[in-house]
Every structure is written in C-alpha cells, then in structure tokens.
Image (cartoon, rainbow, N blue to C red):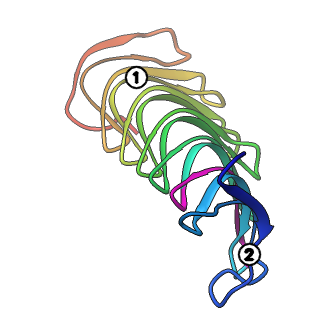
C-alpha cells in the first residue's frame, strides 16, 4: 500500500527478528508482519498498527501453546482461542492476555470441561464444570476456581444436591 515499505528490518533491537510491512513515515511496524523474539521461544504473526500488535494474529509460545485471535495495543484482547500442546483448548474472551469474560476451557489432562465466566484466568462467576472421569457436574457460582454460593452438584450416584455451597465440594 502507498506509504508503506515491505522490508526486512535490521537494527540493534530487531536484527533478524521482524519481516513485514513498515510505515515509511514512522519507521514502525504497520500492516501484516512476523516477529520472532530474540529468545526464539515466542513468535507473533499478524497485524500491526503504529508498531504494536493490533487486529487479528497468532502468538506462539514454543513447547506450550499458541493463541489465535484479537490483539489491541500490543496485548491479547478480545475474542480468541488458545490451543495447548497437550491438546487442551480455551475458546472465549481475553483481557490483557488472560482468560477473562465468557468462555469454554477443555482440559484434556484433568479430563474436565468448564463453560462460563472467567476472571484473571480462573473460573469466576456463573458456569458449568463437568468432571468426565468422575461423572460429576457442578453448575452454579464459582469464585477463584471453586464452586461457591448457589449451585447444583450431580454425582453419578444420582443424588442431586441443589443449594448453597460454602466452599468447593472437593
């Protein structure tokens, strides 16, 4: 596009790290590009505005996970999905890089699935937790990953508990 230069930037901070569009006027990353961090464990490919990750992109942490979705002002922000190397998956809202808002997290290691509200990477608010191996589902209010307040517990015995949870029933 007019006013942009597709280039490979070489310099003290970015040597061999970034390839993509750069604003001719500001010299900052602008448009589509790929940045591989100097430690090579992290990489980002996607949109840039004024030198910051903005719009849709993919952020990868080698040996851990990758995130695909929205970025704003250099932060993971908005709707996206995080896929972990062990097969676990979170799809939903993010705020400042954390699970925050509504989403679904499927943990393949613990064999559990939670759909509901998150705050600061924790189950927090209204949600449904299904423990696949135990055949248990907890539906209700969660605070800091624990069920509390009004809820419903359905164990495989068929006896359903519905009421107020003072703390997590584990």
Question: Disc 1 or 2, which lies upstream in sequence?
Answer: 2
Q: Mark 2 = which residue?
A: 9
On whether residue 49 falls in the magenta region, the answer is yes
Q: Is residue 122 visible?
A: yes
Picture coordinates of residue 116, whole percent (x, y): 43, 24
Res 105 quadrant in image:
top right
Q: Residues within 10 Å of mark 1 (few under 14, many from 20)?
A: many
Tag 1, which secondary structure?
strand
The alpha-carbon separation of the residues under discs 1 and 2 comes to 47 Å
Res 141 quadrant in image:
top left
Q: Residue at x 70, y 40 (%)?
A: 108
Where the N terminus falls, by quadrant?
A: top right
Q: Mark 1 = which residue?
A: 127
Magenta residues, as a range? 40-52
* Image position of 71 (left or right of 31): left
Picture coordinates of residue 76, whole percent (x, y): 51, 49
Picture coordinates of residue 65, whole percent (x, y): 70, 54
Magenta: main secondary structure: strand
Would you place residue 106 above or below residue 127 in this image?
A: below
Picture coordinates of residue 27, whole percent (x, y): 59, 69
Q: How many marks?
A: 2
Q: Residue at x 62, y 85 (%)?
A: 13
Q: Residue 48 versus residue 94: which sits nearer the camera?
A: 48
Q: Residue at x 36, y 48 (%)?
A: 120
On whether residue 107 falls in the magenta region, the answer is no
Q: Residue 107 versus residue 167: which sits nearer the camera?
A: 107
* Image position of 70 (left or right of 4): left
Q: Residues within 10 Å of mark 2 (few under 14, many from 20)?
A: some
Q: Residue 71 versus residue 21: which sits nearer the camera?
A: 21
Q: Residue at x 56, y 16 (%)?
A: 156
Tag 2, which secondary structure?
loop
Q: Is residue 106 visible?
A: no
């Amino acid at each position: 596009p007019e006013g942009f230069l597709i280039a490979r930037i070489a310099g003290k901070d970015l040597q061999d790290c970034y390839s993509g569009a750069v604003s001719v006027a500001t010299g900052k990353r602008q448009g589509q590009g790929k940045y591989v961090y100097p430690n090579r464990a992290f990489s980002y490919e996607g949109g840039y505005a004024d030198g910051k990750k903005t719009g849709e992109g993919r952020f990868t942490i080698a040996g851990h996970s990758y995130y695909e979705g929205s970025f704003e002002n250099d932060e993971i922000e908005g709707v996206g999905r995080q896929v972990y190397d062990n097969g676990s998956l979170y799809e939903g809202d993010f705020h400042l890089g954390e699970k925050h808002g509504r989403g679904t997290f499927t943990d393949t290691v613990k064999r559990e699935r939670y759909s509901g509200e998150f705050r600061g990477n924790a189950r927090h608010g209204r949600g449904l937790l299904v423990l696949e191996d135990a055949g248990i589902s907890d539906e209700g209010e969660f605070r800091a990953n624990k069920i509390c307040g009004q809820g419903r517990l359905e164990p495989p015995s068929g006896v359903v508990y519905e009421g107020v949870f003072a703390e997590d029933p584990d």
